[in-house]
């Protein structure tokens, strides 16, 4: 009997967490996208801001190398509703178009998991947001079709990454561990059960700002 084929999987890159494992604080909302006590560009994400600035200036370094790796050859992204915007439940209206302005940085198809559907949203620069409540494997298959031979990235947030880990649909998880404590909020590696079985740490590399840990399927 031939072995069962492995599931088609996708990586998750540049997933930043605190030392105690939180990707965001509690009470995420419009004026606090990452929750109480966590602001964009602060101690949790300062490595990311510095890496993008260094890359633009032609500089290299550990953080730049990992940042570039996470952006290379991506043809589609999958994210959760909470990463797309601050609203919960039914859409009040369809005026919200994401955090990223008229020209989001993706420039490809983005599949947004949500129980509250709305029409696809075409943005400048080639980004189209598709809103879906289909099963994970169906969305992943659609994303690979849209990527047209390139890679698919699980973008976040924490809840979506946990769901794909539990389903065994992430083949590589790059965690960036910042040396801060948040204490409460949204954890990535939480209540995974058997979903974490079969993973191993393949890399553990520190820069002056953060530690990069890469988990891969055995």
Image (cartoon, grey):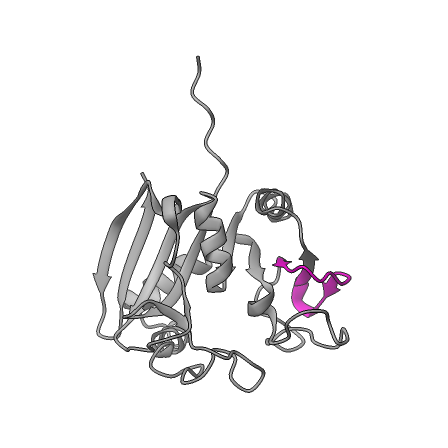
Residue placed most toward the observer, 29 or 216? 29
Q: Is residue 189 left or right of residue 139?
A: left
Residue plotted at (69% across, 69% down): 124
Residue 130: quarter of image: bottom right
Q: Is residue 5 above or below residue 77?
A: above
Which x, y percent locates residue 16?
A: 37, 68
Q: Is residue 110 above or below residue 183?
A: above
Which x, y percent locates residue 214?
A: 31, 54
Residue plotted at (44% across, 43% down): 168
Which x, y percent locates residue 30?
A: 58, 83
Q: Is residue 212 left or right of residue 168?
A: left
Q: Is residue 179 magenta?
A: no
Can residue 109 be seen here? The reply is no
Q: Is residue 209 above or below residue 74?
A: below
Residue placed most toward the observer, 65 or 210? 210
Residue plotted at (67% across, 76% down): 102
Which x, y percent locates residue 134?
A: 66, 48
Residue placed most toward the observer, 139 or 150? 139
Q: Which residues are magenta?
A: 111-129
Quadrant containing the N terminus is top left
Can residue 206 be seen here? The reply is yes
Residue 105: quarter of image: bottom right
Query: What is the total number of numbered labels drawn onto the structure image?
Result: 0
Quadrant containing the C terminus is top left
């Amino acid at each position: 009997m031939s072995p069962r084929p492995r599931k088609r999987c996708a990586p998750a890159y540049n997933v930043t967490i605190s030392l105690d494992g939180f990707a965001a604080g509690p009470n995420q909302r419009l004026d606090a996208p990452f929750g109480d006590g966590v602001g964009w560009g602060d101690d949790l994400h300062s490595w990311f801001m510095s890496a993008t600035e260094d890359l633009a200036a032609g500089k290299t370094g550990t953080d730049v190398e990992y940042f570039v790796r996470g952006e290379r050859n991506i043809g589609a992204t999958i994210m959760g509703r909470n990463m797309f915007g601050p609203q919960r439940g039914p859409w009040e209206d369809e005026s919200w178009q994401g955090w990223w302005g008229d020209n989001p940085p993706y420039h490809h198809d983005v599949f947004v998991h949500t129980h509250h559907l709305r029409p696809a949203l075409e943005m400048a620069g080639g980004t189209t947001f598709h809103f879906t409540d289909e099963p994970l494997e169906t969305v992943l298959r659609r994303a690979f079709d849209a990527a047209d031979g390139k890679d698919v990235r699980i973008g976040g947030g924490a809840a979506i990454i946990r769901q794909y880990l539990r389903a065994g649909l992430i083949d590589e998880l790059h965690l960036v561990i910042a040396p801060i404590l948040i204490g409460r909020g949204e954890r990535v590696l939480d209540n995974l059960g058997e979903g974490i079985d079969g993973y191993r740490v393949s890399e553990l590399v520190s820069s002056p700002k953060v530690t990069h840990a890469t988990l891969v399927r055995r």
